[in-house]
Each structure stands twice: as structure tokens, then as C-alpha cells.
């Protein structure tokens, strides 16, 4: 059986195996095969203490265009 693991590590973190990552869960994904988008959430529903400026979708500037790489971590 194939298991998919979704997790994150903060910048500057040394990682060697899956135990070094904090687990996330998929909340929603695009149903359009041409749109590569997923909304994820930390499994414990907490923003790590090291994160100083979480990004909010409500505060997005709208400058993102189709084809741009986007990395939004916290919603």
C-alpha cells in the first residue's frame, strides 16, 4: 500500500527523515487538471511559534498570475 505524507519543515531546519517534518492535511484541491492548487492545514491546526508573518488569503495583493509559482503556507 502506498502512503502519501504531507508535511513541512521551517527554513534552517535540518531534516533527515519523515519524523523531522510536521504533518499537514489536505483541506481542498483544484478539480481542474490545469490548475495546480491545494489548500493544506497543519494537522494540529497551530502556526509554529517561529513564524512571524503568516500570509492571509484575505490580504493577498492579487498580483499572482496563472503559471506563477506560489507558496502559501498558512491560511
Image (cartoon, rainbow, N blue to C red):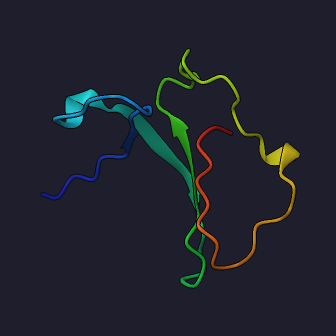
Relative image position of residue 71 (x, y in whole percent): 58, 53
Toward the top, the furthest residue is 49
Relative image position of residue 41 (x, y in whole percent): 55, 38
Left or right of 63 in this view: 5: left
Q: Nearer the viewer, residue 3 or 72?
A: 72
Quadrant hosting residue 47: top right
Residue, x 37% and y 46% (percent of image)?
A: 6
Relative image position of residue 18 (x, y in whole percent): 21, 36
Residue, x 49% and y 23% (percent of image)?
A: 44
Give the total of numbered labels.
0
Residue, x 87% and y 55% (percent of image)?
A: 61
Left or right of 54 in this view: 15: left
Q: Nearer the viewer, residue 59 or 28?
A: 59
Relative image position of residue 8 (x, y in whole percent): 41, 38
Q: Nearer the viewer, residue 2 or 7?
A: 7
Q: Quadrant of the C terminus?
A: top right
Quadrant hosting residue 67: bottom right
**Location of residue 42 with respect to 58 vertically, above or below:** above
**Location of residue 45 with respect to 31 vertically, above or below:** above
Toward the front, the furthest residue is 12
Left or right of 72 in this view: 1: left
Toward the left, the furthest residue is 1
Q: Quadrant of the N terminus?
A: bottom left
**Location of residue 48 with respect to 66 vertically, above or below:** above
Amino acid at each position: 500500500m502506498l502512503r502519501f505524507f504531507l508535511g513541512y519543515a521551517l527554513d534552517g531546519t535540518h531534516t533527515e527523515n519523515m519524523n523531522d517534518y510536521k504533518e499537514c492535511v489536505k483541506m481542498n484541491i483544484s478539480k481542474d487538471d490545469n490548475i495546480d492548487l491545494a489548500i493544506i492545514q497543519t494537522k494540529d491546526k497551530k502556526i509554529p511559534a517561529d513564524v512571524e508573518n503568516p500570509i492571509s488569503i484575505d490580504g493577498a495583493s492579487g498580483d499572482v498570475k496563472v503559471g506563477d509559482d506560489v507558496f502559501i503556507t498558512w491560511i
